[in-house]
Amino acid sequence: MEIPNVGRHGPERYVALAEGASRTNTHGLQRWLAPVSLLLSALFFQNAGLYSATCEYIRWTDEAVATAAGHEGAFAAIESEALEDPVHRLLKASKLASSLEGLSWSPEIWVDLMADCVIIVLLWWLVRRNDLQTWTHLALSASVLAILKGFLAWSTVLPNAAGWQGCKQSLGADGLMYFRRQNTQTLGLFDSLMDISLLTVQSLWLLGRAAPQQLCSDTMFCCSTSSLTIVCLCAYETVARSVDEFRHERRSAVMGLFGLILCAIVLADVTLAIGSKLHYSLDVLAALPLSFLIYGNPALALMAQDWAEPDAGEVKKDPRTAPKIPPDLGVVSVAPCCLPFADLAGSYYLQDRDWDFSQISWTAERQRQHYRRKSEMSAMLEATRRRCEDLAILIQNARQAAECALDERQKDLDLRASEARDMQERELARAQAALEADHEAIAALKLKLASTAGGLSH
């Protein structure tokens, strides 16, 4: 059952707050490395499929060239053999393609640089926030895409989008000789596994794609576009959770700007993938909805949540301590650009509830009960509102009374302080007058003593 998002956290968070059980999850290093190991295994399977497809493509192309020996027309047809792509022709004939020619830095470098920046910042943010669930969800989604691509590459070999001539130019003489040795079984299995392993390590940084100078095959969807789309979806979801506490206007502005940047990166990658003839338009365009479907799969969300928090799905057996609302089992997000379902954009919390819809039927009696409950709730809300207004008035009156009492107390204290100060000044004046009288008496006594001493001397 999917519960729409009503805040930053699901019902489990609110139950935890109500019970005062705020906790901080710390995960071991093995839980962070396990999704990466799964992704590496999936990439190895993907590159093994592409490796096999390249060998097969070169084998049957060599056989076709050998069969067409002596026939110039057949040989020329094989050299330019590729499926028709009208979208590629439109892009190559556009003004945009001509304006990008002659640049010091090719557009592919800029797109790869922006994609790498998104990946680095996303991974740094997930590790910094200790977000193992999103980390696992991203790795699971990329692993499913890699396994699917490897299987399609192995099961169905398509003509290269650039044709046989483009395949020879990208692989070079050494690359063609390498795969021909593989087809003639003169290359050892260990060497093949080592090369596939090196391709896997390289693909981990290149968004699951292999360099065109090393492989020459095609499948039903573009792995670079699908991987970049999943990374952008994950980044958008992570930023949405981070700015959920912002005001609505500010949050909408931040998410709108960030979403436009991510959409621009994905659209640039799609345009360059089609315009550079690395993939067919069908492969690139099919990667977009496939990425949305895989990343938004509830099964992957449940697996990621179960791996990040194994105890999240356990329901307490003690009815006195069991939460009234079941805990979240996973979170599924729908991006606003997921047309035509943009109205359903948001986060949906997955919960395990047993609903019996067979006994629910909307009758006239239920409608009367609904209206009665609605009126009762409206009356309760109105009474609560009035109570809040009365409390606000009482608080305001109490505040004013307290301020008046404070002012009177301050005035009384000021008056007492003034009286005490006046009394001290009067006592000080009397003491000063007495001291002066004593000084005068002492001076007169000194004069008398002096006169008496003078008379005795005579």
Image: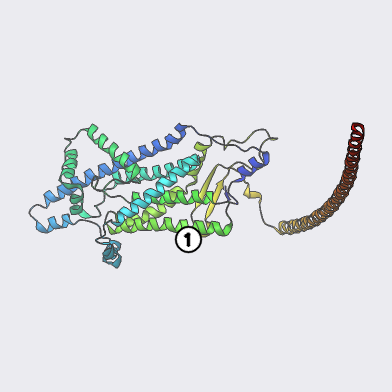
Quarter occupied by the C terminus = top right
Residue 341 seen from this side: no
Q: Nearer the viewer, residue 311 or 115?
A: 115
Task: Please identify the residue farthest to the left as the structure is shown.
Answer: 70
Percent coordinates x, y for residue 123 in the rendering: 43, 43
Q: Nearer the viewer, residue 297 or 252?
A: 252
Coloring applied to the structure: rainbow
Task: Please identify the residue farthest to the front as the structure is shown.
Answer: 458
Relative to 256, is 154 above or below? above
Residue 161 seen from this side: yes
Q: Secondary structure at mark 1?
A: loop
Q: Nearer the viewer, residue 360 or 415?
A: 415
Relative to 198, is 369 above or below? below
Q: Residue at x 18, y 51 (%)?
A: 169
Percent coordinates x, y for residue 124 in the rendering: 44, 43
Q: Is residue 377 left or right of residue 105?
A: right
Percent coordinates x, y for residue 175 in the rendering: 18, 44
Query: Where does label 1 land, which residue?
Result: 340
Q: Is residue 245 left or right of residue 148?
A: right
Task: Please identify the residue farthest to the bottom as the structure is shown.
Answer: 95
Percent coordinates x, y for residue 38 in the rendering: 40, 37
Q: Residue at x 26, y 51 (%)?
A: 158
Q: Residue at x 15, y 46 (%)?
A: 173
Q: Residue at x 58, y 44 (%)?
A: 351
Q: Look at label 1 and name its amino acid.
A: Pro
Q: Nearer the viewer, residue 450 or 15?
A: 450
Dot 1 crowding, Cα within 10 Å, few <14, some 14–19, many 20+? few
Give the tally of numbered discs.
Answer: 1
